[in-house]
Protein backbone atom coordinates (compact mmCIF):
# COMPACT_ATOMS: atom_id res chain seq x y z
CA UNK A 1 0.00 0.00 0.00
CA UNK A 2 1.23 3.47 -0.80
CA UNK A 3 1.61 6.42 1.56
CA UNK A 4 -1.93 7.73 1.79
CA UNK A 5 -3.43 4.27 2.06
CA UNK A 6 -0.86 3.30 4.67
CA UNK A 7 -1.79 6.33 6.68
CA UNK A 8 -5.43 5.24 6.91
CA UNK A 9 -4.37 1.67 7.62
CA UNK A 10 -2.15 2.79 10.49
CA UNK A 11 -4.92 4.94 11.92
CA UNK A 12 -7.22 1.93 11.93
CA UNK A 13 -4.61 -0.18 13.70
CA UNK A 14 -3.97 2.60 16.17
CA UNK A 15 -7.70 2.84 16.97
CA UNK A 16 -7.92 -0.92 17.43
CA UNK A 17 -4.93 -0.85 19.75
CA UNK A 18 -6.37 1.88 21.90
CA UNK A 19 -9.74 0.17 22.23
CA UNK A 20 -8.61 -3.44 22.48
CA UNK A 21 -5.64 -3.79 24.78
CA UNK A 22 -3.71 -6.25 22.64
CA UNK A 23 -4.51 -8.13 19.48
CA UNK A 24 -3.52 -11.76 19.41
CA UNK A 25 -1.21 -12.91 16.64
CA UNK A 26 -3.99 -14.62 14.67
CA UNK A 27 -6.16 -11.48 14.90
CA UNK A 28 -3.33 -9.44 13.43
CA UNK A 29 -2.94 -11.93 10.62
CA UNK A 30 -6.63 -11.80 9.84
CA UNK A 31 -6.55 -8.01 9.73
CA UNK A 32 -3.52 -8.01 7.43
CA UNK A 33 -5.28 -10.47 5.18
CA UNK A 34 -8.27 -8.15 4.93
CA UNK A 35 -5.98 -5.30 3.90
CA UNK A 36 -4.38 -7.54 1.27
CA UNK A 37 -7.70 -8.77 -0.05
CA UNK A 38 -9.14 -5.36 -0.76
CA UNK A 39 -5.95 -4.47 -2.62
CA UNK A 40 -6.31 -7.63 -4.72
CA UNK A 41 -10.05 -7.74 -5.32
CA UNK A 42 -10.57 -4.03 -5.89
CA UNK A 43 -7.43 -3.77 -8.00
CA UNK A 44 -7.76 -1.31 -10.89
CA UNK A 45 -11.27 -0.38 -9.78
CA UNK A 46 -12.02 3.32 -9.52
CA UNK A 47 -14.71 5.28 -7.75
CA UNK A 48 -16.71 7.76 -9.81
CA UNK A 49 -14.74 10.46 -8.03
CA UNK A 50 -11.69 9.12 -9.87
CA UNK A 51 -9.80 7.82 -6.85
CA UNK A 52 -8.82 4.14 -6.47
CA UNK A 53 -11.76 2.15 -5.11
CA UNK A 54 -9.82 0.79 -2.15
CA UNK A 55 -9.96 4.15 -0.35
CA UNK A 56 -13.68 3.70 0.15
CA UNK A 57 -13.55 0.47 2.21
CA UNK A 58 -10.50 1.81 4.03
CA UNK A 59 -12.32 4.97 5.12
CA UNK A 60 -15.45 2.98 5.99
CA UNK A 61 -13.35 0.73 8.26
CA UNK A 62 -11.67 3.79 9.77
CA UNK A 63 -15.07 5.21 10.70
CA UNK A 64 -16.17 1.90 12.19
CA UNK A 65 -12.93 1.75 14.21
CA UNK A 66 -13.59 5.28 15.49
CA UNK A 67 -16.97 4.07 16.67
CA UNK A 68 -15.02 1.52 18.70
CA UNK A 69 -16.69 -1.50 17.20
CA UNK A 70 -14.98 -4.86 17.45
CA UNK A 71 -12.36 -6.42 15.19
CA UNK A 72 -14.85 -8.49 13.17
CA UNK A 73 -16.85 -5.36 12.37
CA UNK A 74 -13.72 -3.56 11.23
CA UNK A 75 -12.73 -6.46 9.01
CA UNK A 76 -16.28 -6.67 7.66
CA UNK A 77 -16.17 -2.92 6.93
CA UNK A 78 -12.95 -3.44 4.97
CA UNK A 79 -14.53 -6.27 3.00
CA UNK A 80 -18.01 -4.77 2.71
CA UNK A 81 -17.97 -4.31 -1.08
CA UNK A 82 -15.92 -7.38 -1.90
CA UNK A 83 -18.86 -9.66 -2.69
CA UNK A 84 -20.61 -7.11 -4.85
CA UNK A 85 -17.65 -5.52 -6.61
CA UNK A 86 -14.89 -8.06 -6.12
CA UNK A 87 -16.79 -11.21 -7.00
CA UNK A 88 -15.80 -13.01 -3.81
CA UNK A 89 -18.33 -15.44 -2.33
CA UNK A 90 -19.78 -15.72 1.16
CA UNK A 91 -18.11 -19.10 1.60
CA UNK A 92 -14.68 -17.83 0.62
CA UNK A 93 -14.96 -15.12 3.28
CA UNK A 94 -16.19 -17.64 5.81
CA UNK A 95 -13.30 -19.97 5.04
CA UNK A 96 -10.60 -17.31 5.07
CA UNK A 97 -11.90 -15.16 7.91
CA UNK A 98 -14.81 -16.45 9.97
CA UNK A 99 -18.55 -16.93 9.79
CA UNK A 100 -19.33 -13.72 11.64
CA UNK A 101 -17.33 -11.58 9.24
CA UNK A 102 -19.01 -13.36 6.33
CA UNK A 103 -22.46 -12.72 7.82
CA UNK A 104 -21.74 -9.02 8.37
CA UNK A 105 -20.37 -8.56 4.86
CA UNK A 106 -23.31 -10.33 3.27
CA UNK A 107 -25.70 -8.35 5.46
CA UNK A 108 -24.31 -5.11 4.07
CA UNK A 109 -24.08 -6.54 0.55
CA UNK A 110 -27.74 -7.42 0.34
CA UNK A 111 -28.59 -3.87 1.17
CA UNK A 112 -26.57 -2.29 -1.57
CA UNK A 113 -26.53 -5.42 -3.73
CA UNK A 114 -29.29 -4.20 -5.93
CA UNK A 115 -27.97 -0.84 -6.87
CA UNK A 116 -30.11 2.23 -7.18
CA UNK A 117 -28.69 2.77 -10.63
CA UNK A 118 -31.82 1.28 -12.08
CA UNK A 119 -33.74 2.86 -9.25
CA UNK A 120 -36.80 0.71 -9.31
CA UNK A 121 -38.56 1.65 -6.14
CA UNK A 122 -39.36 -1.98 -5.49
CA UNK A 123 -35.71 -2.88 -5.36
CA UNK A 124 -35.20 -0.15 -2.83
CA UNK A 125 -38.01 -1.58 -0.76
CA UNK A 126 -36.69 -5.11 -1.09
CA UNK A 127 -33.26 -3.94 0.02
CA UNK A 128 -34.71 -2.20 2.99
CA UNK A 129 -36.54 -5.29 4.07
CA UNK A 130 -33.36 -7.34 3.84
CA UNK A 131 -31.46 -4.78 5.80
CA UNK A 132 -34.01 -4.81 8.62
CA UNK A 133 -33.85 -8.57 8.67
CA UNK A 134 -30.04 -8.72 8.84
CA UNK A 135 -29.94 -5.89 11.35
CA UNK A 136 -32.40 -7.56 13.66
CA UNK A 137 -30.00 -10.48 13.80
CA UNK A 138 -26.97 -8.32 14.35
CA UNK A 139 -26.98 -4.56 14.86
CA UNK A 140 -23.49 -4.18 13.50
CA UNK A 141 -24.90 -4.63 9.98
CA UNK A 142 -26.62 -1.25 10.14
CA UNK A 143 -23.60 0.40 11.75
CA UNK A 144 -21.33 -0.71 8.92
CA UNK A 145 -23.98 0.37 6.44
CA UNK A 146 -24.17 3.82 8.02
CA UNK A 147 -20.38 4.18 7.87
CA UNK A 148 -20.54 3.15 4.21
CA UNK A 149 -23.28 5.68 3.51
CA UNK A 150 -21.37 8.47 5.25
CA UNK A 151 -18.40 7.93 2.97
CA UNK A 152 -20.61 7.69 -0.12
CA UNK A 153 -22.25 10.99 0.72
CA UNK A 154 -18.88 12.68 0.95
CA UNK A 155 -18.19 11.78 -2.67
CA UNK A 156 -21.75 12.34 -3.85
CA UNK A 157 -20.58 15.29 -5.96
CA UNK A 158 -19.12 12.78 -8.45
CA UNK A 159 -22.53 11.33 -9.33
CA UNK A 160 -24.99 12.77 -11.83
CA UNK A 161 -27.74 15.09 -10.59
CA UNK A 162 -30.48 12.51 -10.61
CA UNK A 163 -28.54 9.94 -8.59
CA UNK A 164 -27.39 12.62 -6.19
CA UNK A 165 -30.99 13.49 -5.48
CA UNK A 166 -32.14 9.88 -5.11
CA UNK A 167 -29.34 8.98 -2.72
CA UNK A 168 -29.76 12.19 -0.75
CA UNK A 169 -33.52 11.76 -0.34
CA UNK A 170 -33.11 8.14 0.63
CA UNK A 171 -30.60 9.23 3.25
CA UNK A 172 -32.99 11.80 4.70
CA UNK A 173 -35.99 9.47 4.65
CA UNK A 174 -34.43 6.22 5.77
CA UNK A 175 -30.84 6.24 6.95
CA UNK A 176 -30.74 9.38 9.06
CA UNK A 177 -34.02 8.54 10.85
CA UNK A 178 -32.72 5.02 11.45
CA UNK A 179 -29.55 6.45 12.96
CA UNK A 180 -31.64 8.64 15.28
CA UNK A 181 -33.82 5.75 16.30
CA UNK A 182 -30.68 3.85 17.22
CA UNK A 183 -29.66 6.82 19.34
CA UNK A 184 -26.80 7.70 16.98
CA UNK A 185 -27.57 11.42 17.06
CA UNK A 186 -24.17 12.47 15.86
CA UNK A 187 -24.27 10.18 12.84
CA UNK A 188 -27.87 11.13 12.05
CA UNK A 189 -26.92 14.81 12.02
CA UNK A 190 -23.86 14.19 9.85
CA UNK A 191 -25.93 12.20 7.34
CA UNK A 192 -28.56 14.93 7.19
CA UNK A 193 -26.14 17.76 6.65
CA UNK A 194 -24.28 15.86 3.94
CA UNK A 195 -27.52 14.98 2.12
CA UNK A 196 -29.35 18.29 2.61
CA UNK A 197 -27.67 20.35 -0.18
CA UNK A 198 -28.27 17.58 -2.74
CA UNK A 199 -31.83 16.83 -1.71
CA UNK A 200 -33.07 20.41 -1.38
CA UNK A 201 -30.49 22.82 -2.86
CA UNK A 202 -32.65 25.96 -2.65
CA UNK A 203 -33.78 25.32 0.89
CA UNK A 204 -30.22 24.57 1.88
CA UNK A 205 -28.98 27.92 0.57
CA UNK A 206 -31.82 29.75 2.26
CA UNK A 207 -31.21 28.08 5.62
CA UNK A 208 -27.53 28.79 5.41
CA UNK A 209 -28.10 32.47 4.73
CA UNK A 210 -30.79 32.84 7.39
CA UNK A 211 -28.90 31.06 10.12
CA UNK A 212 -25.33 32.01 9.28
CA UNK A 213 -25.36 35.60 10.41
CA UNK A 214 -27.44 35.02 13.49
CA UNK A 215 -25.37 32.02 14.53
CA UNK A 216 -22.15 34.04 14.33
CA UNK A 217 -23.65 36.77 16.39
CA UNK A 218 -24.94 34.29 18.96
CA UNK A 219 -21.58 32.61 19.21
CA UNK A 220 -19.88 35.92 19.89
CA UNK A 221 -22.42 36.59 22.57
CA UNK A 222 -21.91 33.18 24.15
CA UNK A 223 -18.16 33.68 24.22
CA UNK A 224 -18.85 36.35 26.80
CA UNK A 225 -21.70 34.58 28.56
CA UNK A 226 -20.10 31.16 29.14
CA UNK A 227 -17.37 32.44 31.52
CA UNK A 228 -20.08 34.14 33.57
CA UNK A 229 -21.98 30.88 33.93
CA UNK A 230 -18.80 29.05 34.80
CA UNK A 231 -18.03 31.62 37.48
CA UNK A 232 -21.50 31.32 38.97
CA UNK A 233 -21.22 27.52 39.10
CA UNK A 234 -17.85 27.75 40.80
CA UNK A 235 -19.31 30.10 43.41
CA UNK A 236 -21.62 27.22 44.22
CA UNK A 237 -18.83 24.65 44.31
CA UNK A 238 -19.78 23.09 41.02
CA UNK A 239 -16.97 22.27 38.62
CA UNK A 240 -18.17 21.07 35.25
CA UNK A 241 -16.05 18.71 33.15
CA UNK A 242 -16.75 21.04 30.25
CA UNK A 243 -19.01 23.80 29.05
CA UNK A 244 -19.41 24.08 25.34
CA UNK A 245 -21.79 25.65 22.94
CA UNK A 246 -22.95 23.86 19.90
CA UNK A 247 -24.63 25.16 16.82
CA UNK A 248 -27.73 23.27 15.80
CA UNK A 249 -27.05 21.44 12.56
CA UNK A 250 -28.41 22.97 9.36
CA UNK A 251 -30.97 20.38 8.41
CA UNK A 252 -32.65 20.53 11.81
CA UNK A 253 -32.67 24.33 11.61
CA UNK A 254 -34.47 24.00 8.30
CA UNK A 255 -37.06 21.66 9.77
CA UNK A 256 -37.64 23.99 12.66
CA UNK A 257 -37.87 27.01 10.38
CA UNK A 258 -40.76 25.34 8.62
CA UNK A 259 -42.57 24.99 11.94
CA UNK A 260 -41.77 28.57 12.99
CA UNK A 261 -43.03 30.44 9.94
CA UNK A 262 -39.47 30.80 8.63
CA UNK A 263 -38.62 33.16 11.47
CA UNK A 264 -35.06 32.42 12.55
CA UNK A 265 -35.53 34.49 15.70
CA UNK A 266 -38.04 31.95 16.98
CA UNK A 267 -35.45 29.19 17.10
CA UNK A 268 -34.14 29.40 20.62
CA UNK A 269 -31.72 26.53 20.41
CA UNK A 270 -29.88 27.72 17.31
CA UNK A 271 -26.85 27.62 19.53
CA UNK A 272 -27.26 25.78 22.83
CA UNK A 273 -24.96 25.69 25.82
CA UNK A 274 -24.07 22.23 27.03
CA UNK A 275 -22.73 21.74 30.55
CA UNK A 276 -21.19 18.36 31.33
CA UNK A 277 -20.67 16.98 34.85
CA UNK A 278 -19.40 13.77 36.35
CA UNK A 279 -22.49 12.93 38.41
CA UNK A 280 -26.25 13.22 38.14
CA UNK A 281 -26.37 15.08 41.49
CA UNK A 282 -24.17 17.81 40.09
CA UNK A 283 -26.49 18.13 37.10
CA UNK A 284 -29.51 18.83 39.26
CA UNK A 285 -27.54 21.22 41.50
CA UNK A 286 -26.32 23.07 38.43
CA UNK A 287 -29.88 23.33 37.15
CA UNK A 288 -30.80 25.03 40.42
CA UNK A 289 -27.93 27.49 40.02
CA UNK A 290 -28.87 28.21 36.40
CA UNK A 291 -32.52 28.82 37.30
CA UNK A 292 -31.42 31.08 40.13
CA UNK A 293 -29.06 33.07 37.96
CA UNK A 294 -31.37 33.33 34.92
CA UNK A 295 -35.11 33.37 34.84
CA UNK A 296 -36.37 30.11 33.27
CA UNK A 297 -38.88 30.29 30.44
CA UNK A 298 -42.02 28.58 31.77
CA UNK A 299 -42.93 25.19 30.30
CA UNK A 300 -39.67 24.81 28.41
CA UNK A 301 -37.94 22.73 31.07
CA UNK A 302 -37.55 19.02 30.31
CA UNK A 303 -36.15 16.39 32.65
CA UNK A 304 -35.00 13.59 30.38
CA UNK A 305 -32.85 12.24 33.20
CA UNK A 306 -35.84 11.17 35.26
CA UNK A 307 -37.87 10.42 32.11
CA UNK A 308 -35.46 9.35 29.37
CA UNK A 309 -36.62 9.35 25.77
CA UNK A 310 -37.44 5.85 24.51
CA UNK A 311 -34.20 5.74 22.53
CA UNK A 312 -32.41 6.16 25.86
CA UNK A 313 -31.55 9.86 25.53
CA UNK A 314 -30.91 11.52 28.89
CA UNK A 315 -30.28 15.18 29.69
CA UNK A 316 -31.79 18.20 31.42
CA UNK A 317 -33.03 20.84 28.98
CA UNK A 318 -34.08 24.30 29.99
CA UNK A 319 -34.58 27.59 28.21
CA UNK A 320 -33.76 30.75 30.14
CA UNK A 321 -34.00 34.50 29.65
CA UNK A 322 -30.53 35.98 29.77
CA UNK A 323 -29.93 39.35 31.42
CA UNK A 324 -30.08 40.91 27.96
CA UNK A 325 -33.55 39.47 27.48
CA UNK A 326 -32.57 36.78 24.98
CA UNK A 327 -33.83 33.23 25.18
CA UNK A 328 -31.16 30.58 25.41
CA UNK A 329 -31.28 26.81 25.68
CA UNK A 330 -29.07 25.15 28.28
CA UNK A 331 -28.51 21.39 28.37
CA UNK A 332 -27.02 19.73 31.43
CA UNK A 333 -25.91 16.09 31.49
CA UNK A 334 -23.24 13.67 32.66
CA UNK A 335 -20.29 12.53 30.59
CA UNK A 336 -21.79 9.13 30.06
CA UNK A 337 -25.11 10.63 28.94
CA UNK A 338 -23.16 12.82 26.53
CA UNK A 339 -21.38 9.80 25.05
CA UNK A 340 -24.61 7.89 24.73
CA UNK A 341 -26.46 10.83 23.23
CA UNK A 342 -23.82 11.19 20.54
CA UNK A 343 -23.03 7.57 19.93
CA UNK A 344 -26.12 5.64 21.04
CA UNK A 345 -25.72 1.92 20.74
CA UNK A 346 -22.07 2.31 19.83
CA UNK A 347 -21.53 3.85 23.27
CA UNK A 348 -23.42 1.02 24.95
CA UNK A 349 -21.14 -1.36 23.19
CA UNK A 350 -18.13 0.57 24.32
CA UNK A 351 -19.18 0.76 27.96
CA UNK A 352 -20.02 -2.90 28.05
CA UNK A 353 -16.72 -3.88 26.54
CA UNK A 354 -14.72 -1.59 28.78
CA UNK A 355 -15.86 -3.75 31.63
CA UNK A 356 -14.56 -6.90 30.05
CA UNK A 357 -12.06 -6.65 27.24
CA UNK A 358 -12.14 -10.38 26.68
CA UNK A 359 -15.81 -10.18 25.85
CA UNK A 360 -14.91 -7.61 23.25
CA UNK A 361 -13.29 -10.21 21.09
CA UNK A 362 -15.44 -13.17 22.02
CA UNK A 363 -18.91 -11.74 21.72
CA UNK A 364 -20.80 -13.57 19.03
CA UNK A 365 -23.62 -11.16 18.43
CA UNK A 366 -24.24 -7.58 19.33
CA UNK A 367 -26.85 -7.85 22.07
CA UNK A 368 -29.93 -5.75 21.55
CA UNK A 369 -30.33 -3.11 24.26
CA UNK A 370 -33.81 -3.20 25.74
CA UNK A 371 -34.84 0.15 24.32
CA UNK A 372 -34.19 -1.15 20.82
CA UNK A 373 -36.64 -4.02 20.91
CA UNK A 374 -38.61 -2.14 18.25
CA UNK A 375 -36.14 -3.62 15.80
CA UNK A 376 -37.36 -7.07 16.74
CA UNK A 377 -40.93 -5.89 16.44
CA UNK A 378 -40.04 -4.69 12.99
CA UNK A 379 -38.71 -8.09 12.04
CA UNK A 380 -41.95 -9.74 13.17
CA UNK A 381 -44.01 -7.09 11.53
CA UNK A 382 -42.44 -7.43 8.12
CA UNK A 383 -43.75 -10.99 7.93
CA UNK A 384 -47.29 -9.64 7.70
CA UNK A 385 -46.56 -7.64 4.54
CA UNK A 386 -46.70 -9.29 1.16
CA UNK A 387 -45.29 -6.25 -0.64
CA UNK A 388 -41.93 -4.82 0.36
CA UNK A 389 -43.02 -1.43 -0.92
CA UNK A 390 -45.96 -1.36 1.51
CA UNK A 391 -43.60 -2.42 4.26
CA UNK A 392 -41.14 0.36 3.52
CA UNK A 393 -43.89 2.98 3.35
CA UNK A 394 -45.38 1.74 6.61
CA UNK A 395 -42.00 1.76 8.36
CA UNK A 396 -41.36 5.30 7.17
CA UNK A 397 -44.49 6.47 8.96
CA UNK A 398 -44.71 4.12 11.92
CA UNK A 399 -41.05 3.92 12.87
CA UNK A 400 -38.98 6.58 11.19
CA UNK A 401 -41.09 9.74 11.29
CA UNK A 402 -40.70 12.37 13.97
CA UNK A 403 -41.61 10.86 17.27
CA UNK A 404 -43.74 11.89 20.19
CA UNK A 405 -43.59 10.28 23.60
CA UNK A 406 -46.74 9.92 25.64
CA UNK A 407 -47.34 8.27 28.99
CA UNK A 408 -49.73 5.61 30.22
CA UNK A 409 -51.48 6.35 33.52
CA UNK A 410 -48.85 4.08 35.13
CA UNK A 411 -46.05 6.21 33.71
CA UNK A 412 -44.82 3.89 30.97
CA UNK A 413 -43.52 5.75 27.96
CA UNK A 414 -45.09 4.96 24.61
CA UNK A 415 -43.23 6.05 21.54
CA UNK A 416 -45.46 7.07 18.62
CA UNK A 417 -45.09 8.92 15.31
CA UNK A 418 -46.02 12.59 15.29
CA UNK A 419 -49.70 13.04 14.56
CA UNK A 420 -50.68 9.79 16.28
CA UNK A 421 -54.18 9.62 17.78
CA UNK A 422 -55.59 7.88 20.89
CA UNK A 423 -56.60 5.01 18.61
CA UNK A 424 -52.96 4.52 17.52
CA UNK A 425 -51.95 4.66 21.16
CA UNK A 426 -54.55 2.06 22.16
CA UNK A 427 -53.39 -0.40 19.49
CA UNK A 428 -49.78 0.02 20.55
CA UNK A 429 -50.72 -0.93 24.11
CA UNK A 430 -52.64 -4.00 23.03
CA UNK A 431 -54.77 -5.02 20.06
CA UNK A 432 -57.65 -5.95 22.37
CA UNK A 433 -57.62 -2.48 23.92
CA UNK A 434 -57.74 -0.92 20.47
CA UNK A 435 -60.59 -3.22 19.50
CA UNK A 436 -62.76 -2.12 22.43
CA UNK A 437 -62.13 1.59 22.85
CA UNK A 438 -65.08 3.33 24.47
CA UNK A 439 -63.49 6.73 24.98
CA UNK A 440 -60.19 8.35 25.76
CA UNK A 441 -58.85 10.78 28.32
CA UNK A 442 -55.78 12.95 27.87
CA UNK A 443 -54.47 14.52 31.06
CA UNK A 444 -57.82 13.57 32.63
CA UNK A 445 -59.90 15.37 30.02
CA UNK A 446 -62.05 13.46 27.56
CA UNK A 447 -60.83 14.05 24.00
CA UNK A 448 -62.21 12.96 20.61
CA UNK A 449 -60.62 9.84 19.14
CA UNK A 450 -59.05 11.80 16.30
CA UNK A 451 -57.23 14.08 18.76
CA UNK A 452 -53.56 14.57 17.86
CA UNK A 453 -51.46 13.51 20.83
CA UNK A 454 -48.51 15.60 22.01
CA UNK A 455 -45.34 14.63 23.83
CA UNK A 456 -45.67 14.38 27.59
CA UNK A 457 -49.43 13.86 27.68
CA UNK A 458 -50.88 11.12 29.88
CA UNK A 459 -53.26 9.02 27.82
CA UNK A 460 -55.88 6.73 29.25
CA UNK A 461 -58.12 4.47 27.19
CA UNK A 462 -61.41 3.39 28.69
CA UNK A 463 -62.65 0.18 27.13
CA UNK A 464 -66.01 -1.49 26.85
CA UNK A 465 -66.29 -4.99 25.48
CA UNK A 466 -69.40 -4.09 23.48
CA UNK A 467 -67.56 -1.40 21.52
CA UNK A 468 -65.92 -2.10 18.18
CA UNK A 469 -63.73 -0.20 15.75
CA UNK A 470 -65.52 2.01 13.28
CA UNK A 471 -64.55 2.16 9.60
CA UNK A 472 -64.38 5.94 9.97
CA UNK A 473 -61.30 5.52 12.17
CA UNK A 474 -59.35 4.54 9.06
CA UNK A 475 -59.57 8.14 7.92
CA UNK A 476 -57.74 9.68 10.85
CA UNK A 477 -55.43 7.07 12.38
CA UNK A 478 -51.78 7.71 11.71
CA UNK A 479 -49.98 4.37 11.80
CA UNK A 480 -50.10 1.72 9.10
CA UNK A 481 -50.02 -0.83 11.90
CA UNK A 482 -53.21 0.62 13.36
CA UNK A 483 -54.92 0.59 9.96
CA UNK A 484 -54.02 -3.04 9.42
CA UNK A 485 -55.37 -4.04 12.79
CA UNK A 486 -58.60 -2.13 12.29
CA UNK A 487 -59.08 -3.61 8.82
CA UNK A 488 -58.52 -7.05 10.27
CA UNK A 489 -61.35 -6.59 12.74
CA UNK A 490 -63.66 -4.98 10.22
CA UNK A 491 -63.16 -7.94 7.96
CA UNK A 492 -63.95 -10.39 10.73
CA UNK A 493 -67.09 -8.70 11.96
CA UNK A 494 -68.19 -8.40 8.32
CA UNK A 495 -68.99 -4.73 8.33
CA UNK A 496 -68.07 -3.20 5.01
CA UNK A 497 -66.01 -0.05 5.41
CA UNK A 498 -68.01 3.08 4.73
CA UNK A 499 -66.97 4.79 1.56
CA UNK A 500 -64.28 7.27 2.48
CA UNK A 501 -65.30 10.80 1.63
CA UNK A 502 -62.12 11.66 -0.20
CA UNK A 503 -61.21 10.57 -3.70
CA UNK A 504 -57.94 8.75 -4.11
CA UNK A 505 -55.74 8.59 -7.12
CA UNK A 506 -53.68 5.56 -7.88
CA UNK A 507 -51.25 4.56 -10.61
CA UNK A 508 -51.42 0.99 -11.78
CA UNK A 509 -48.76 -0.67 -13.84
CA UNK A 510 -49.93 -3.91 -15.37
CA UNK A 511 -47.45 -6.32 -16.93
CA UNK A 512 -49.17 -8.84 -19.16
CA UNK A 513 -48.63 -11.28 -21.99
CA UNK A 514 -49.74 -9.88 -25.32
CA UNK A 515 -53.20 -10.92 -26.46
CA UNK A 516 -55.68 -9.39 -28.85
CA UNK A 517 -58.31 -7.40 -26.98
CA UNK A 518 -56.39 -7.40 -23.74
CA UNK A 519 -56.57 -3.65 -23.26
CA UNK A 520 -60.34 -3.72 -23.80
CA UNK A 521 -60.72 -6.45 -21.22
CA UNK A 522 -58.76 -4.42 -18.70
CA UNK A 523 -60.62 -1.19 -19.38
CA UNK A 524 -63.96 -3.02 -19.16
CA UNK A 525 -63.17 -4.32 -15.71
CA UNK A 526 -62.10 -0.90 -14.55
CA UNK A 527 -65.24 0.69 -15.93
CA UNK A 528 -67.46 -1.94 -14.29
CA UNK A 529 -66.03 -0.95 -10.94
CA UNK A 530 -67.05 2.63 -11.72
CA UNK A 531 -63.51 3.76 -11.33
CA UNK A 532 -62.50 6.75 -13.40
CA UNK A 533 -59.53 6.34 -15.69
CA UNK A 534 -57.51 9.54 -15.81
CA UNK A 535 -54.78 8.39 -18.19
CA UNK A 536 -53.65 5.18 -19.78
CA UNK A 537 -50.82 4.15 -22.03
CA UNK A 538 -49.36 0.84 -23.11
CA UNK A 539 -46.07 -0.29 -24.56
CA UNK A 540 -44.33 -3.49 -25.57
CA UNK A 541 -41.52 -4.38 -23.23
CA UNK A 542 -38.03 -5.34 -24.36
CA UNK A 543 -39.05 -8.91 -23.97
CA UNK A 544 -41.43 -8.76 -26.97
CA UNK A 545 -43.97 -11.11 -25.47
CA UNK A 546 -44.84 -8.77 -22.62
CA UNK A 547 -46.84 -5.56 -22.53
CA UNK A 548 -46.93 -2.89 -19.91
CA UNK A 549 -50.01 -0.74 -19.35
CA UNK A 550 -49.96 2.26 -17.15
CA UNK A 551 -53.26 3.49 -15.80
CA UNK A 552 -54.00 6.39 -13.58
CA UNK A 553 -57.34 5.97 -11.82
CA UNK A 554 -59.49 7.81 -9.38
CA UNK A 555 -61.21 5.46 -6.98
CA UNK A 556 -63.20 5.37 -3.80
CA UNK A 557 -62.84 2.35 -1.60
CA UNK A 558 -63.10 -0.53 -4.02
CA UNK A 559 -59.58 -0.65 -5.38
CA UNK A 560 -59.01 -4.01 -3.72
CA UNK A 561 -61.85 -5.64 -5.64
CA UNK A 562 -60.58 -4.05 -8.85
CA UNK A 563 -57.21 -5.68 -8.33
CA UNK A 564 -58.87 -8.99 -7.55
CA UNK A 565 -60.90 -8.89 -10.75
CA UNK A 566 -57.95 -7.84 -12.85
CA UNK A 567 -55.92 -10.73 -11.56
CA UNK A 568 -58.57 -13.08 -12.98
CA UNK A 569 -57.24 -12.24 -16.47
CA UNK A 570 -54.73 -15.03 -16.89
CA UNK A 571 -52.41 -13.04 -19.19
CA UNK A 572 -51.73 -10.54 -16.41
CA UNK A 573 -48.43 -11.33 -14.75
CA UNK A 574 -48.03 -8.52 -12.31
CA UNK A 575 -49.82 -5.41 -11.08
CA UNK A 576 -47.87 -2.68 -9.37
CA UNK A 577 -49.78 0.00 -7.49
CA UNK A 578 -48.63 3.39 -6.41
CA UNK A 579 -50.93 5.63 -4.39
CA UNK A 580 -50.76 9.32 -5.18
MN1 LIG B 1 -19.56 0.71 -0.06
Image: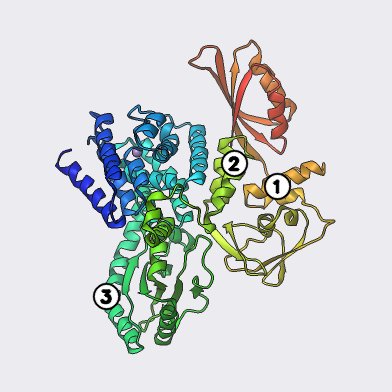
Give the image location of residue 347, x and y in percent: 40, 59
Specify the label residue 382 is tagged with.
Answer: 2
Sequence-wise first label, 1 or 2: 2
* Label 3 neighbour load within 10 Å: few <14, some 14-19, many 20+: few
Q: Quadrant of the C terminus?
A: top right
Please give the name of the residue rendered at 47% of the width and 50% of the height, measured from the top-left corner: 178
Q: Quadrant of the N terminus?
A: top left
Q: Is residue 17 left or right of residue 298?
A: left
Please name whichever residue, 13 or 209, is drawn nearer the observer in this view of the structure: 13
Please give the name of the residue rendered at 34% of the width and 54% of the height, measured from the top-left corner: 68
Tell whether label 3 touches label 1 (CB within 8 Å). Answer: no
> Is the CB–ligand 1 distance for label 2 below 8 Å?
no
Sequence-wise first label, 1 or 3: 3
Counting labels gives: 3
User: Of all residues shown, which one is farthest toward the top?
Assistant: 516
Frontmost of labels 1 and 3 is 1
Give the image location of residue 419, x and y in percent: 60, 57
Please give the name of the residue rendered at 80% of the width and 53% of the height, measured from the top-left corner: 468
Quote the CA–CA distance across marks 1 and 2.
14 Å
Which residue is the site of mark 3? 223
Amino acid sequence: MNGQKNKIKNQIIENINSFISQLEEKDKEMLEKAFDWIEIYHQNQKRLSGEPFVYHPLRTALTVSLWRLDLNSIIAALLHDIIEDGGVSFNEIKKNFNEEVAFLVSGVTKISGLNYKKASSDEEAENFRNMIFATSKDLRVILIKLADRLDNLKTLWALDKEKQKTKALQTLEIFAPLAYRLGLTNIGAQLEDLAFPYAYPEEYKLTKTLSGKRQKELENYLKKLVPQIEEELKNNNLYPVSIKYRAKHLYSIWRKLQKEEMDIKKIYDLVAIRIIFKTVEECYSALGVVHHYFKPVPSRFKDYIALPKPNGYQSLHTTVFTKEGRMLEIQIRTQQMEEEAEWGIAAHWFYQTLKDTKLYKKRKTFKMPRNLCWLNQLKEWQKSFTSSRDFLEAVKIDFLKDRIFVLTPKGDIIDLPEGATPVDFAYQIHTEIGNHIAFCKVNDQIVPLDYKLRSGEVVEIITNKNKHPSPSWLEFVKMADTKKKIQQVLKNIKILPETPKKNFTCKLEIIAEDKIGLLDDILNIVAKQQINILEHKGKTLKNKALLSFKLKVKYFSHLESLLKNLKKIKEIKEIKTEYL
